[in-house]
Amino acid sequence: LQKHKLLNSDVLALLPNNDDILPNFYEPIRARVHEALTTEDLILTRSNSYSPAVDLVKGPKALSDIFSDADVSFLSSEESKAWAAGVLQNSRADKLLSDLEVSTWGYSEFLENVHSKYWGIGERKENTDWLAAKPLPWLRKFYLTLYSAAKRTDSESRLSSFLSICYTSKRTVTRFYD
């Protein structure tokens, strides 16, 4: 299944999750399936590789379309994070990923990660170098996503701290202060 990329979200939807009412006889099977999915490279990622559940994140398509696996790893300061592929919110596959304790990387997490990387004590050269290496079209999407995330999470009062990160024509990152 894995070789032919058939081990995907459709298969995840078939596997037992904690909401399924199964006879006690099946509980060891469910536990073993969950253990394998958590520790072995069995879940398809957006980059067409396989990872264990402990190395995955799930979140809105709007975020996964902009941020690569490497971007999520960098922003979250967690090595080897990858987007779970093709899992719709509130689907059986999503429920299974929740049972497996796959982290959600949503708008709030995105804002918190950006804030910790680019505001105050957390600001370091590696952070500004990462941002400076991004192309201008990507940066436009980044700022639009910051604005959208702030609106969605009622964090508009903090928006000025996020938007004060500035990319210059000399491929450097600077900050406008109030």
Image: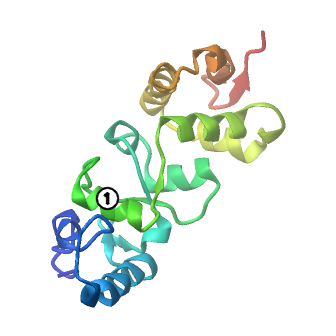
Residue 46 appears in the picture as rendered: no
Of the 4 image quadrants, the one containing the N terminus is bottom left
Q: Residue at x 25, y 86 (%)?
A: 26
Q: Is residue 165 above or below residue 60?
A: above
Vertical order, 50 against 92 (above or below): below
Is residue 115 in sight in this rendering? yes
Q: From the viewer's perspective, tell me whether residue 89 is left or right of residue 176.
A: left
Residue denoted by label 1: 95
- Please name whichever residue, 142 or 38, is drawn nearer the observer in this view of the structure: 38
What x and y, as percent, mark residue 38?
Answer: 43, 76
Q: Is residue 38 above or below residue 61?
A: below
- Looking at numbered disc 1 in the image, what kind of residue is underneath it? Lys
Q: Secondary structure at mark 1?
A: helix
Who is closer to the viewer here, 153 or 81? 153
Q: Indicate the quadrant containing the C terminus: top left, top right, bottom left or bottom right.
A: top right
User: What is the quadrant of residue 177 in the picture?
Assistant: top right
The residue nearer to you, when weighing 102 against 3, is: 102
On screen, residue 20 versus residue 83, left or right, reads left
Residue at the extreme front: 23
Instruction: Residue 118 in the image: state x and y as whole percent.
Output: 71, 34
Q: Residue at x 69, y 21 (%)?
A: 161
Relative image position of residue 68 (x, y in whole percent): 43, 50
Q: Residue at x 29, y 65 (%)?
A: 48
- The spot of residue 117 in percent (x, y) is 70, 40
Q: How is the image coloured?
A: rainbow
Q: Is residue 157 left or right of residue 53?
A: right
Q: Closest to the observer: 173 or 115?
A: 115
